[in-house]
Amino acid sequence: MNGAQPGLGAAHASSRAAILDVIRAAGTISRVELTRATGLTAATVSTVVRRLIDEGLVVEAGRAESTGGKPRMLLQLDPYARYAVGVHLDHAGITYVIANLGGAVVARWRRPGAGADDPREVVARIAAEIATTMTRIGIDPAVVLGVGVVSPGPISTSTGMTLTPPVMQHWAEFPLGAAIEDATGLPVLLDNDATAAAVGEYWSGGVATGAACATLYMGTGIGAGIVVDGTVYRGRSSNAGEIGHVCVALDGPECWCGSRGCVEAFAGPAAVVAQAAAAGVALPGRGVSEDFAALARAAARGEAEPMRLLRASAEYLGVAAQTLANVLDLDLVVLTGPSFALAGSLYLPAVQERLARGFFARGAHPVRVTISTHASEAAAVGGAALVLQSELAPRQVGTRMVVEALTDLPTGA
Amino acid sequence: MNGAQPGLGAAHASSRAAILDVIRAAGTISRVELTRATGLTAATVSTVVRRLIDEGLVVEAGRAESTGGKPRMLLQLDPYARYAVGVHLDHAGITYVIANLGGAVVARWRRPGAGADDPREVVARIAAEIATTMTRIGIDPAVVLGVGVVSPGPISTSTGMTLTPPVMQHWAEFPLGAAIEDATGLPVLLDNDATAAAVGEYWSGGVATGAACATLYMGTGIGAGIVVDGTVYRGRSSNAGEIGHVCVALDGPECWCGSRGCVEAFAGPAAVVAQAAAAGVALPGRGVSEDFAALARAAARGEAEPMRLLRASAEYLGVAAQTLANVLDLDLVVLTGPSFALAGSLYLPAVQERLARGFFARGAHPVRVTISTHASEAAAVGGAALVLQSELAPRQVGTRMVVEALTDLPTGA
DNA sequence: CTTACTTTGTTCAGCGGCCTAAGAATCTAC
DNA sequence: GTAGATTCTTAGGCCGCTGAACAAAGTAAG
């Protein structure tokens, strides 16, 4: 049978990563519980935990009540043992976040966007911002694990180090990651907003290790990030989770992506704003984000047309969530991103209801739907979480290599 | 279980599994190429390959041309070193397959279905069928790795051993896996048709190790199986891939699943047959499968209404494939299952065209779309492949356990 | 043919991860 | 205060993987 006998050989990428991840998810846990949760032996847990304590990552924090024998010594992450920086590049501005090991935000600020400036200049600004704030709030650079840089749009897979936000074409071939690495002297990771937000939710939301979790990220577009069993699912070219371009009507309106009837074309912020304008709703007219914000405020005030439009959008978002949940058999869907930060209370019940009634496996288990506690800065927090994740609980090391190497081989039998 | 079997040596799971899997995918490969493809060292490859040769799984097969030094010794699986049995339980009948290591079918036969018979009696019949054919074609039971039993519908996650085909309610609590294990003396795996078909395609279709691949399985319903990097993606409750119940029209017809506008309600065989009946097309009327077959033949003859109906269905299937590909960022979509075996030539171009124009990441890479070479018996072949996969190239051992253990823990910070 | 060089594959000592087994520490219960 | 339960640690060993040196088997000049 599927004899899931743990213990023999390399069941986990590394026991260190597994143990750290379980401590993170549990918040507070004893060594015995760790052995049960990881499948490792008590001996292994003991030595690995000792090492983590020596590194300062984990601290002993009181003891549990006895259950008839020696009481358990409780362990938890020392949230201030390490830090990570998250940087969210968006067309409107740059959001910075410094997070501690627990995923909690210890600093957060925002600066104007890159505009048409030279990339090298922008990188210098970013490095200066990070350095300044780190000294100001007194964080030793030695305990900063790295910088997670997040932007909308897919990462370039060719170099693995550049990224091409659709709005910043002149950045297309600029080696952003390497440049920031040079300028800050810190390791740098790049990823897109939705994926980063998913990792952020996983890390700071206390999501269980084995959970199948996705975030629905609505900024100006609609995307999703997928985290299963602590691992980001990226797909072939890091474009997994493109839920905004799933078709919900064969004869729907044309979308900028080239397809028809995409969720985003019906229900994305740009579409909703356009619908509002067509319906004669008064809007500031200074870009999609601000118009959508105005619309959300109007709906909150109870204005009929804005409410109708947002309700319709929420209906489609519910469909997108249902699609994600059915395809991936999810445990948890988190709504996050600037647009949900504004209008989440309107979207949340719609998505919840849709999944309660339309999720295929609802007989087997429910799908929890929540709004992120830091929806407006989720991408930046996610950038920091990416660093925490990759430095502390790496998974699937080497798999990437295999894929690359295989492209040289004959295609198959 | 059998005495000197591999698989007990789950200790050397990882590198052994990786190497076997790369050999499978490549068909023929040398040791140096294995080191490059797996990321292991030449020393490790050498010793692991020697062990595989000793076990008889791998054979040396000639030498490649020299590239300026010692010529490479080519390795390949010995297809006749091991066998696996696949059993597909369907409402209409039971399909048996015996496959060799290469995933090639060496025997294939079909018997009437279970009907209302006592499950224990059916299990005895199945065991007898397997034993009879094995002796008839002269396969030593010692080289048979196990039996993969496949049925439509989800597996019960509670026991991990029962499965509940919607059409056979009185099997609901019967421990099918354990019973067949007892009756045959072989390890047994259970899974649903779409998932099994995906593994079958991966194993016998020579799919590359790192590929992101899904099969669209159309039997009486529409499902999908997902295999990424050699691992089946199952989701929380083994219900991943329920693409048939993805919504493609907010106000679509009601579906038996309780939702509205599901792909299956528009384009599943049952729906197509119903549409044909409503349109006055003459059909045998002896069940969905036969009616759909008649419709496919009529369309192949060029009859207008059947062609129109199947084209419409293909359009929706294309949407389903696009959804899968966008959410998972796929490399490969395989159409398989009885319905595609009949009407695949009509569906294939529609799905291909849809993905060529509507796949979100089409700028980064194409999505290949093919029809399985054994679409009509894909589920049974998949059952055998499940066994090959789990015995020879197991992945992610122990992860499941972690999940179960974690449910006892506090939910988080 | 001989020599030099390239490439492929093997052997072997060693490191590190994780296990088994045994023991130490610290509580409850009677 | 002793017995039992439970938690955690220490010691020793197995095994997979690696690094490095070595052996084998070819090509390319002279």
Image (cartoon, coloured by chain):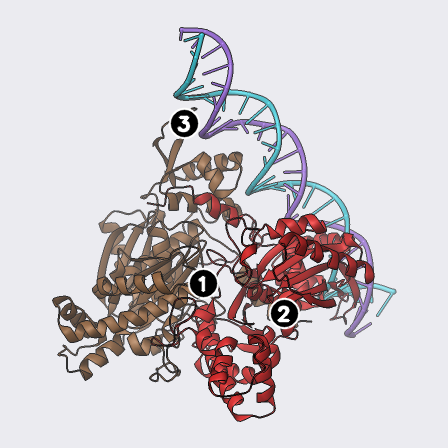
Chain colours: A red, B brown, C purple, D cyan
CB atoms of marks 1 and 3 within 8 Å: no
Q: Helix or strand or loop: what does disc 1 sit on?
A: helix
Report whether A44 appears left or right of A337: right
Chain for mark 2? Answer: A
Q: For residue A262, say whether it is visible.
A: yes
Count the numbered circles shown. 3
Please give the residue where the numbered disc 3 appears in the rendered image. Answer: B67
2 vs 3, front mark: 2
Task: Identify the residue at horizontal 48%, vertical 62% (top origin).
Answer: A240
| Camera-side residue of A281 and A322 | A281
- The residue type indicated by label 1 comes to Leu
| Camera-side residue of A65 and B17 | B17
Which of the 4 quarters of the picture holds residue B72?
top left
Task: Report the quarter where the C terminus of chain B lies.
Answer: bottom right
Residue B328: which disc? 1
Q: Helix or strand or loop: what does disc 2 sit on?
A: helix
| Camera-side residue of A273 and C12 | A273
Cα–Cα gap, marks 1 and 2: 22 Å
- The residue type indicated by label 2 comes to Ala
Q: Closer to the N terminus: mark 1 or mark 3?
A: 3
CB atoms of marks 2 and 3 within 8 Å: no
